[in-house]
Amino acid sequence: MSKKIGVSILGATGPVGQRFISLLADHPFFEIEAIFASQKSAGKRYEEAVNWIIDTPLPASVAGMVIRSLNEQVPTKIVFSALPSDVAGNIELQLRSAGKYVFTNSSSNRMRPDVPIIVPEVNPEHLRVIEGKDGFIVANPNCTTAGLVIPLKAIHDAFSIKKVLVVSMQALSGAGFPGVPSLSIFDNLLPHIKNEEDKVKRESKKILGKFEDGSFKNAEFIVDARCNRVAVRDGHTEVVFVESEGKFEIEEIKEVFRNFKGMPQKFNLPTAPEDPIVIAEDPLRPQPILDRNNGKGMAITVGNIRKDEIFGLTFTLVSHNTIRGAAGGSILNAELALKLGYMKDL
Ligand code: NAP
């Protein structure tokens, strides 16, 4: 690509916004042109306004950029949104009407019939809903669903899923900043995350469903979820139980996971991990601290793959919630949409 494409980041100071900054600072297709946050940060230099909490250095190219307010024009066609869901909804719809290509992490517009929830290895064909549009919104799923649907897609294609139960142990960065008070989570676990279980159930069925005759048809299998918050900084762990139509041996499941690839790997997209699913053979893996950065935070690490007496199959996965589950997932969506020609004027 001869000249990089300018992009804007909305919600640039939160944990997801910081990941966008970090992943886009040296991106081969895109360059950060404008950054936006709330009125409290607008007008300040980024390094002055941000409380940088992620494990990579604040890029020098962004440190001195002045944060804009959403009352100002968004200057670029491509917009990455990391806004809280209570403010994202209308703003993203207005940007779409103004002809922008919005790649969002917020849940506000995910279930709209004209908004696809994309995980590029799983359902790239759902992008057809934005075909020929002057402006569009492409969502990525909530962070728990993002990690779950990749191994589910591999299993579903080979053995046809009937039922899924997932029990998550979710990292603190998933709650934004400052997030959960330390006295609520230190030495503790919280057995409820508001709205999370419903999001996992409905988003996974939309993603693993079909796009037919111009509309989304949910996957027919049952999904249930129990979500917990744990004292981990980054990386969601999920214990998954699956009942399938087809019979399998554990070695066949591992083979299906090992061989799983999608369009991002075929096109060698910059943010794509070489292997979307990494198998951990040590029974003490996967662990968030050891496995969340596999594939630069874009791979799903799966271990403890065993037969289960009730469902048939169980395994544990670890997925990075602010990379694959948020900013990295959104950037991969933009790379794929560009490659497939959905942003026709760019
Ligand atoms: P966050 O910590 O709440 O950060 C929100 C960002 O939005 C900050 O930059 C904040 O700016 C800005 N903001 C807040 N109110 C605003 C307003 N009225 N106008 C303009 N900007 C405003 O959130 P986060 O954890 O980074 O998550 C961002 C979004 O991604 C959320 O919708 C979340 O649900 C979703 N998501 C998060 C994760 C995760 O793992 N964290 C994963 C998937 C999806 P100031 O600093 O100036 O307040």
Image (cartoon, helix red, strand yellow):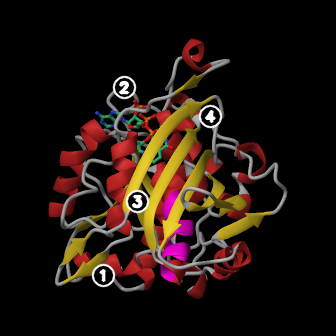
Q: What is the chief secondary structure element of the magenta stretch?
A: helix
Label 1 sits on residue: 345
Q: In the rendered structure, which disc, 3 or 2, sits on the residue that comes first in sequence?
A: 2
Q: Percent position (x, y) of residue 200?
A: 40, 51
Residue found 68% across the figure and 80% down from its top: 252
Task: State whether residue 9 appears in this view.
Answer: no
Q: Is mark 3 within 8 Å of ligand 1?
A: yes
Q: Residue furthest right?
A: 282
Going by the numbered disc 1, the residue's amino acid type is Asp
Residue 314, above or below 3: above
Give the magenta part as a residue range.
Answer: 148-157
Q: In the rendered structure, which disc, 2 or 1, sits on the residue that comes first in sequence?
A: 2
Q: In the rendered structure, which disc, 2 or 4, sits on the residue that comes first in sequence?
A: 2
Q: Closer to the camera: disc 4 or disc 1?
A: 4
Element at badge 2?
Answer: loop
Task: State whether residue 304 appears in this view.
Answer: yes
Element at badge 3?
Answer: loop
The CA span between labels 2 and 4 is 18 Å
Q: Ligand 1 quadrant?
A: top left
Q: In the rendered structure, which disc, 4 or 1, sits on the residue that comes first in sequence?
A: 4
Is disc 1 surrounded by few (<14), some (14 to 19) or many (20+) residues within 10 Å? few
Q: Percent position (x, y) of residue 66?
A: 44, 40
Q: Closer to the camera: disc 4 or disc 3?
A: 3
Label 2 sits on residue: 40
Element at badge 1?
Answer: loop
Element at badge 4?
Answer: loop
Residue found 71% across the figure and 54% down from its top: 293
Q: Is mark 2 within 8 Å of ligand 1?
A: yes
Q: Closer to the camera: disc 3 or disc 2?
A: 3
